[in-house]
Image (cartoon, grey):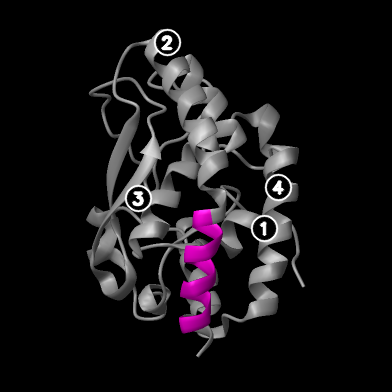
């Protein structure tokens, strides 16, 4: 029942947020066009609910035709000094504004405001049995791991937390995640997956209760 109510709430919130989104869209479009003149949106192939293919929208933060670099654990390489990221893209990533384009996915019904982070499509075959429950629910613009850990934990840990969320989703859990996300974004916590020795201490996982 909650999933049905949640879908209605997602749609209503997305509709209400559209005016703000259009303001962000205009500002980001102008900035990207001035910066390098390339496309405004990037459409990524991700794993959606029921392990189906999802085309997830993001504001483009990398240079056109950039090479896709993965870490040993299969996660996407993401560093503060990544030369593939544009000047505007760095700002979009650190403020999470690049993720706001997923509001379009919420309107389409293939994503939720809050839910597990959608993994890259190529990672589908790497999921273990105790991780696959993650795909029971729609992926979200933000979620449990993004709010509390962002990029400070391993891919394995993220998948297990997301599977736990999918099996324990509730209204109050979503409310808690929503407000924690706001705090995390404003603090710029754990933005990057790949950090140097100086920054590493700042990325230690926090205990969550």
Q: Give the quadrant of residue 205.
A: bottom right
Q: Is 68 displayed left or right of 100 in the figure? A: left
Q: Give whichever of discs 1 and 2 has the lower sequence position.
A: 2
Tell me: residue 191, above or below residue 29. Answer: below
> Dot 2 surroundings within 10 Å: few (below 14), some, or many (20 or more)?
few
Q: Residue 131, position in %: x, y?
A: 41, 74
Highlighted magenta segment, given as a residue range: 4-15
Name the secondary structure under disc 1: helix
Task: Give the residue number, with chain letter if any, for mark 1.
Answer: 148
Determine the residue located farthest toward the bottom in the rendered image.
Answer: 1
Q: Residue at 23% of width from left, 68% of height from top?
A: 52
Q: Give whichever of discs 2 and 4 has the lower sequence position.
A: 2
> Dot 4 surroundings within 10 Å: few (below 14), some, or many (20 or more)?
some
Name the secondary structure under disc 3: loop
In three-dimensional space, the C-alpha distance between marks 1 and 2, rounded to whole angstroms, equals 32 Å
Task: Give the residue number, with chain letter if any, for mark 4.
Answer: 184
């Amino acid at each position: 029942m909650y999933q049905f109510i949640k879908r209605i709430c997602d749609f209503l919130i997305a509709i209400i947020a559209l005016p703000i989104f259009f303001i962000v869209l205009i500002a980001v479009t102008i900035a990207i066009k001035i910066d390098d003149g390339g496309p405004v949106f990037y459409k990524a192939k991700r794993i959606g609910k029921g392990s189906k293919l999802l085309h997830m929208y993001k504001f483009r933060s990398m240079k056109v035709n950039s090479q896709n670099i993965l870490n040993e654990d299969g996660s996407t390489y993401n560093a503060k000094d990544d030369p593939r990221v544009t000047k505007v893209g760095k700002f979009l990533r650190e403020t999470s504004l690049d993720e706001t384009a997923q509001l379009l996915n919420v309107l389409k019904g293939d994503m939720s405001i809050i839910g597990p982070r959608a993994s890259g499509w190529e990672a589908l075959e790497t999921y273990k049995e105790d991780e696959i429950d993650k795909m029971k629910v729609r992926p979200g613009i933000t979620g449990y791991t993004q709010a509390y850990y962002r990029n400070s934990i391993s891919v394995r840990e993220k998948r297990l937390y997301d599977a736990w969320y999918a099996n324990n989703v509730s209204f109050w859990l979503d409310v808690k995640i929503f407000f924690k996300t706001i705090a995390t974004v404003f603090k710029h916590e754990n933005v990057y997956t790949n950090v140097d020795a100086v920054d590493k201490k700042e990325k230690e996982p926090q205990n969550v209760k």
